[in-house]
């Protein structure tokens, strides 16, 4: 079997492909998305990661060495997870929003009554 050679005659190094198992790993599943066989996308940084010849090493390198990624991941981990939403909570929230809107319109109307503009 003949080796695959580039334009300069040197043997080409095979490209690494993204494995679906990596997307399921807990440390990557939140932010890693497959774009094609040899690239991934970081949802936090909005950056494309080329796997090149490093494979999962490119993903680990992005995660550990990219300051923007680390700070966004730390920020994400600090946000508390909301309780599951029930229909009662939604109804209460809708009532509060409606009451706020009515009060805002009433206050605005009262301010206009006394405006000498």
Image: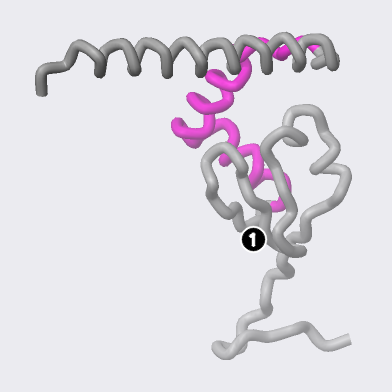
Q: Which of 42 and 117 is in front in this view?
A: 117
Residue 17 at x, y percent in the picture? 77, 60
Quarter of the picture containing the N terminus is bottom right
Q: Nearer the viewer, residue 81 or 92?
A: 92
Residue 14 at x, y percent in the picture? 73, 69
Q: Main secondary structure of the magenta part?
A: helix
* Residue displayed at 82% across by 33% down: 25
| Quarter of image, res 104 | top left
Residue 97, above or below 51 = above
* Residue displayed at 75% across by 16% down: 90
Please, which residue is most extreme toward the left here? Answer: 117
| Quarter of image, res 87 | top right
Residue 4, above or below 40 = below
Coloring scheme of the render?
one colour
Range drawn in magenta = 55-83
> Is 2 on the left-hand or right-hand side of 63?
right
| Quarter of image, res 21 | top right
Residue 29, above or below 18 = above
Quarter of the picture containing the C terminus is top left
Q: Say which element carries label 1.
A: loop
Q: Which of 97 and 57 is in front in this view?
A: 97
Residue 109 at x, y percent in the picture? 34, 17
Residue 99 at x, y percent in the picture? 57, 11
Q: Does the magenta stretch include residue 58?
A: yes
Q: Name the residue under label 1.
A: 52
* Residue displayed at 77% across by 10% down: 89
**Neighbours of disc 1 within 10 Å: few (<14), some (14-19), many (20+):** some
């Amino acid at each position: 079997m003949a080796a695959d050679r580039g334009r300069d005659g040197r043997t080409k190094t095979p490209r690494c492909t993204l494995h679906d198992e990596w997307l399921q790993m807990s440390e990557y599943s939140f932010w890693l998305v497959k774009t094609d066989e040899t690239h991934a996308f970081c949802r936090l940084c909005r950056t494309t990661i080329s796997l090149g010849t490093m494979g999962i090493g490119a993903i680990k390198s992005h995660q550990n060495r990219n300051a923007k990624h680390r700070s966004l991941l730390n920020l994400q981990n600090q946000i508390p997870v909301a309780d599951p939403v029930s229909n009662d909570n939604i109804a209460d929230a809708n009532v509060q929003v409606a009451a706020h809107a009515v009060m805002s319109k009433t206050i605005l109307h009262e301010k206009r009554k006394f405006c000498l503009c």
